[in-house]
Amino acid sequence: MPVNLSRTLCVVVALAIATGCTTARYRRNADQEVYGLIAEKTPNVPGMPASFTIEADPAEPLAGLPEAAADTDFLGEAAASEQGAHVIRLEKALELAVTHSRSYQNEKELLYLQALNLTLERHQFAPIFSGQLTGDYARSTSDVSKMSGARGLADALPGWIDETGDIADTRLSGATTLSQALGLLPPGSVPAGLPAALASVGGLAGSPGQLLSNYADLVESAFTATGANQPREEIMNERTYSGQTSFGVGILLKGGAEIALGLTSNFLRYVTGDPRVTTSSALTGSITQPLLRGAGHKIAAENLTQAERDLLYQLRSFTRFRKEFAVDVASNYYRILQSRDAARNTWQGYQAFVEAFERDQAHAEVGRITQADLGRSQQAKLNAEVSWIAAVRSYRQSMDEFKILLGLSTDAPVVLEPGELTRLRERGISSIPLSTEAAVDVALVSRLDLYTVRDEVDDAERKLAVAANALKPGLDLIVTGQVDTVPEDDAFSELDWQRARWSAGFDLDLPFDRKSERNAYRRALISHERAAREFDLAVDGVKLEVREAWRDLNEAEATYRIRQIAVDLNQRRVEEQKLRAELGRATALDQIDAQNDLVSAQNGLTAALVSHTIAKLRLWLDMGILYIKEDGQWEELSDVE
């Protein structure tokens, strides 16, 4: 194989290995471009974190967390599951959720994929290069009629006599030399006895030309008689190698024009047979500019424009999700603390019923209370035990569900920080100095999802214009050109610009059949009208959500204050019934009612406190003023301007 071809193949193989040796490079390039696009649009979305990545955090999620105390008697047999468990504070729970939650990771990946789509749309308007190299090695056979050696000699003998009748080649003189020449022929190609016959003619008289002429006649006659001068069929092998290289670049302009340039080269070399090398090259180019359908920046770049806006919408959606996610995590966190507190209160109530039953049992033995009252006390104890078991079960179930929300295994030994509920009680509740209508006005200018719905009306208007443009006839201006080379042996020639060819013309597509385009235009009209209605509906929906959150907050505030009074009242009732029981003047029914009402009031107070905290977060969320930090924490708002 020629050295040049070997070098070419080596280069091709090296390039193929270099471009396909690893997929990590493609992944890094995609990440770099996507993260760059997200960082580019992040300043346009308030509340979007400055840094973004979809890579998982390799750190151990529970490393460095403190262990739980042993105050778990109220959990009964379930207390063993919390021995040595890691304590998670609310801030740590939000951080774990941001870094390990599966749903949070899904939302991040949706944002990444949306940005990935934009990279492709932008790439459509960048120079797109293409290259290809092909090589072929071919072997072919053909049947060739080849003259025998004897026939060649017979045909050559007449040519030895010149115009004067003398021997043209003086190196051969006489029949003896001719007979020696016949000996050079391959064995079997000379008829038997022919050399001796020719030699016997050597003694004849006459000029050398006459002698050779006689020899020739004699040889021709002998060959014809024996069939030695008949041609024979042979198989000829022919091997060739050929190659073709092509390099091109295409550019799509935002005005709708398409530019294409291409350079192709071909070569063909014969290894056997014809030793020629055939080469040729050509440079081609074309420009296509739509003049009616598909013309203009707004039409040609519509997909790019929509992809740009879709990424902005996804950023807003992700930011909104972060707010909702933080509220969900906090809500679940506080609800679990509420459930844990309910289990503790129910256990304390159960212990009170056990103590009351033992006291009533002693009184019944001395006849101070009836057996009916004792049975009523025992039934109350059993009911309290059932309630306690159900409360513990509810707490453990909600705890397992919370682990899944954080992205932890349900087997993870974790427990929530009880001090978070204590801090809530110490802080109490506070009102937001803002009227309902003022809160609605803030939401209408702050809600990111409302901005997206408003922008979708603009999207529908653009798509309506695109659909209307598709109804126009297609009229394209097309300019093409080509420059060839003159083939030369074993080399690629330079381009012959003096013989370049070009052409210009128009391509008209008459709008005879526009049923599909007509339907698309009508759908676009409906989509535009629907988008306007969706925006009006979204505005009303935001107003409804804000007002509902405001009402929930006011209800939680009122409920909390009522529950506080109820707890104080029922604590006095329980103490009174305990004193009356010690004096033997209490009835079982009064004791049961007082203790049950106290447990219910205590649980209700905790529920009201948690509901008020969650309602405040929901109001901030619905107003669009809840801002989440990168670690998942929300920024506390002391006042709303």
Image (cartoon, rainbow, N blue to C red):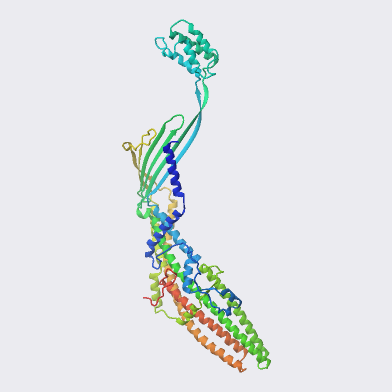
For the question of whether residue 328 can be seen, the reply is no
Q: How many marks?
A: 0
- Measuring from the top left, give residue 101's x and y in whole percent: 50, 66
For the question of whether residue 371 can be seen, the reply is yes
| Above/below status of 110 relative to 439 | above
Q: Nearer the viewer, residue 574 or 177?
A: 177
Which residue shows up at 44% across the image and 11% down it? 173
- Measuring from the top left, give residue 456's x and y in whole percent: 41, 62
Q: Nearer the viewer, residue 130 or 477?
A: 130
Q: Nearer the viewer, residue 373 or 62?
A: 62
In this view, the residue farthest toward the left is: 498
Query: Could you say which quadrant of the image residue 360 lies in?
Result: bottom right
- Measuring from the top left, give residue 564's x and y in whole percent: 49, 85
- Measuring from the top left, give residue 142's x and y in whole percent: 50, 28
| Above/below status of 69 relative to 241 | below
| Above/below status of 564 relative to 274 | below
| Above/below status of 425 relative to 200 | below
Query: Could you say which quadrant of the image residue 387 lies in?
Result: bottom right
In this view, the residue farthest toward the top is: 205
Which residue shows up at 39% across the image and 40% down it? 264
The N terminus sits in image quarter: top left
Query: Could you say which quadrant of the image residue 306 lies in?
Result: bottom left
